[in-house]
Structure formats: C-alpha cells, structure tokens
Image (tube, rainbow, N blue to C red):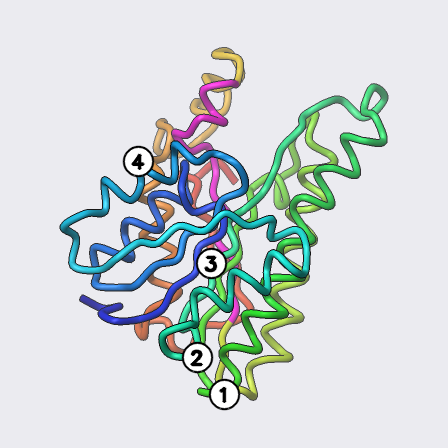
C-alpha cells in the first residue's frame, strides 16, 4: 500500500500501458484520475475493472494537448485536497512513415500530440505540487528516442525531446521538493503492437536480451518505483524497460 490515499493523475490512462499504470496505483490504495481523449467504452471498462480495489479510479475526458484541458484535469484530480502527489504523462500518438513520404500533417500531429500534453500537464501539475513542496512527475518516452527506429523520425524526435524536457524540468522543480523522471519502454504488448507487421515484431524480439515482448504491467512497475519513496533520491533520469533491446 505504498500509495495509500495518494492523489495520482495518469494521462492516456484508460488503455494499454496507461491502463496498467492506473490499475497498479489503485491496487496500492491510490486515488487515480485517468484522463482519456475519446474512447468512452475503454473508460467505462477500466472503472468496472477497478471496482473492489483498495484505491479508486475516476476517469475524465480531456484534451490534454490544450491548456484548458490540462488545467481542468488537474483541478478535478486535486478537488478533494487541493494538490496532487504524482503525475504520469503517458498520453501520446504514433504515425509511422518513412521520412521521404511523411506528410507535414503527420509530423505536426505526432510532435504536437506528444509534446503539448507534456508542457500543459507539467505546467498545471507542478502548480498543484508547489504548495506542499513535494510531488513526483513520471513522463513516458520510448526506446525509439535512444536507438532510433526506421519510419519513426517524428515519433523518435518527440520522445527524445520528452527526455530533454524532463531533465530540464527536474532541475527547475528539484528545489521545490518535486522529482521528475522518464520511463522509456521497448516493445510492449498493447494495441499499438498488435497493428505492427509480424516480421517486424519478430525481428525486434530476436534483437532483445530476454527474447520476448514486454507486458504493460512491467512498465507500470517501473513507473510506480520512480513514483515511490524508494526512489526519493532519483531525479532527471531515464529508466529503460525494454528487455535488453537497447
């Protein structure tokens, strides 16, 4: 019950890795606010799955790529106490294409979709943490930011920027008692992976040390570690969870 009664926000928190993160925190007694953009059915299913857990999960429909959406999310999450304890920025988008054929719209959509939520949510999230002079931010990146992936110049650029953003943020908010770190997952069993070509997945799996695809719950465990008191002297770091691909 590491997170009993903690107020936690998870963006993109109703599906895939985000869902696993939300449920993991709720199992440890947290009050989770899981944000999502459009899929109402996934939000309802998450709440049903969370019923009976030691903690709670509330869902909120919000476009966190906008300032108004991010502010509304933080206000809702902090309504009971006036503050939040942990912010996990998981919301993101992917549109793979080789650079010579990539449209300007695909570039803009991915860069905006992955970086604007970071800016807006961290801005308003930090404001909710300052009063207590404590808090933790965990941002999700990708191993594409570290090793590069063909067809993902837009995605890799945005996820690399997320790491640099977090390291700079950690220096800003450290004196306020707030920590900021990154988790960079590898090939994880989600809907996104299901859409990949089998031969591509097989090639990546063969290149890993553990020789398998990761589970969303394994990423959730890494996020929980960085959010916990066990990581109280860790900030500005990037934890890779990829089974040894990088």
Q: Residue at x 47, y 64 (%)?
A: 87
Q: Nearer the viewer, mark 2 or mark 3?
A: 2
Tell me whether the residue at label 1 lies in contact with that at label 2, contact meaning CB atoms closer than 8 angstroms. yes
Decide which of tag 4 and tag 1 comes sooner along the chain: 4
Q: Is residue 157 left or right of residue 231?
A: right
Secondary structure at numbered mark 3: strand
Side of 20 relative to 106 (left or right): left
Give yes or no for contact between labels 4 and 1 (Cβ–Cβ under 8 Å). no
CA–CA distance in space, label 1 to label 3: 19 Å
Going from the N terminus, do you reach mark 3 or mark 4 first? 4
Q: Which SS class for mark 2?
A: loop
Q: CA distance from mark 4 to mark 1?
A: 34 Å
Front: mark 3 or 4: 4
Which residue is denoted by mark 3 in the rendering? 88
The label nearer to you, 1 versus 2, is: 2
Q: Earlier in the sequence, mark 1 or mark 3?
A: 3
Q: Which residue is mark 2?
A: 82
Above-or-below relation of 205 to 172: above
Looking at the picture, tell me which residue is in the foreground, 8 or 208. Answer: 8
**Residue position for label 1:** 131
**Percent position of residue 162, x then y:** 64, 55
**Residue indicated by mark 4:** 45
Q: Which residues are magenta?
A: 180-195
Q: Which element type, helix, strand or loop, lies under badge 4?
A: helix
Q: Is residue 186 magenta?
A: yes
Alpha-carbon distance for marks 3 and 4?
20 Å
Note whether 95 is above or below 91 in the view shown.
above
């Amino acid at each position: 019950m590491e997170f009993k009664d903690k107020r936690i926000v998870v963006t993109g928190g109703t599906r895939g890795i985000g869902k696993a993160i939300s449920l993991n925190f709720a199992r440890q007694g947290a009050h989770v606010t899981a944000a999502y953009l459009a899929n109402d059915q996934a939000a309802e299913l998450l709440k049903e799955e969370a019923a009976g857990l030691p903690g709670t999960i509330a869902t909120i429909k919000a476009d966190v790529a906008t300032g108004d959406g991010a502010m509304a999310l933080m206000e809702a999450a902090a309504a009971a106490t006036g503050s939040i304890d942990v912010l996990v920025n998981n919301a993101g988008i992917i549109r793979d294409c080789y650079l010579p054929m990539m449209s300007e719209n695909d570039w803009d959509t991915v860069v905006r979709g992955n970086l604007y939520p970071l800016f807006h949510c961290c801005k308003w999230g930090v404001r909710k943490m300052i009063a207590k002079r404590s808090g933790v931010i965990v941002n999700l990146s990708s191993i594409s930011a570290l090793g590069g992936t063909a067809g993902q110049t837009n995605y890799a650029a945005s996820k690399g920027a997320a790491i640099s953003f977090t390291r700079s943020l950690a220096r800003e908010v450290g004196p306020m008692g707030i920590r900021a770190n990154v988790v960079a997952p590898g090939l994880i069993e989600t809907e996104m992976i299901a859409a990949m070509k089998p031969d591509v997945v097989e090639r990546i799996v063969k290149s890993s040390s553990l020789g398998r695809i990761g589970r969303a719950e394994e990423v959730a465990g890494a996020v929980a570690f960085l959010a916990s008191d066990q990581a109280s002297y860790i900030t500005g770091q990037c934890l890779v969870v990829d089974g040894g691909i990088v």
